[in-house]
Amino acid sequence: RCSSLGIIRTVGSQLSLFSMTLLSIRRYHHIQKGLSIPAPLTAKGATKVMMIAFLIICASVTVAVIPLLPSFEDIFVNAMTYDPKNRLFVGLPDKEMHISVLTEFYGRMSKNSPSWST
């Protein structure tokens, strides 16, 4: 499915973004401390690294899946599509054209239409 591929792509992009951000912050922190030699990895340190990796994975999956949830489908709109059998909106690229067609089709409409740019 297309949404599954989108989730995989988004998770990969977010993992890369969050990991590189974390690595950059950690590098900056070590430069500020004076580039000291790091201590050997302890069990506490390994647990901390695994928790951070788990949080990065959870954040990446959350960012990828939230737009697909039914309660958020009207917030995350990537494009407008219509049923191919409905020939009413073919070739209408913007809101003004849609409003004019709907006004023509239904006769009268409110001129106070909400903005699409929220």
Image (cartoon, rainbow, N blue to C red):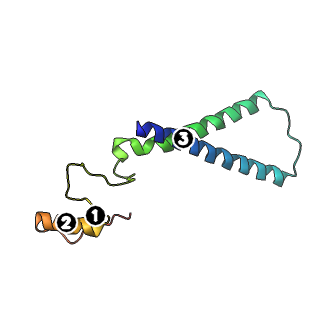
Mark 3 crowdedness (10 Å alpha carbons): few <14, some 14-19, many ≥20: many
Residue at the (14%, 67%) spot, across then down:
104
Q: Find out whether the residues at labels 1 and 2 contact each other: C-beta distance under 8 Å.
A: yes
Chain-order first, disc 1 or disc 2: 1
In the image, residue 2 above or below residue 25: above
The N terminus lies in quadrant? top left
The amino acid sitting under disc 2 is Val
> Quarter-wise, where is residue 58 in the image?
top right
Which residue corresponds to mark 3?
11
Left or right placement of residue 23 versus residue 73 in this view: right
Residue 116 rendering spot, x and y as whole percentages: 34, 63
Q: Residue furthest bottom?
A: 111
Q: Which residue occupies 72% across, 46% down? A: 23
The quarter of the rendered structure image containing the C terminus is: bottom left
Q: Is residue 88 above or below residue 10?
A: below
Disc on the earlier residue, 1 or 3: 3
Q: Which residue is mark 2?
A: 101
Closer to us: 18 or 47: 18
Secondary structure category for the residue under label 1? loop
Question: On the image, numbered disc 1 is attached to which residue?
Answer: 92
Please report whichever mark, 3 or 2, sits nearer to the chain's N-terminal start.
3
Q: Position of residue 111 (x, y in %)?
A: 21, 72
Q: Amino acid at mark 3?
A: Val
**Residue beneath the point at 12% across and 63% down:** 106
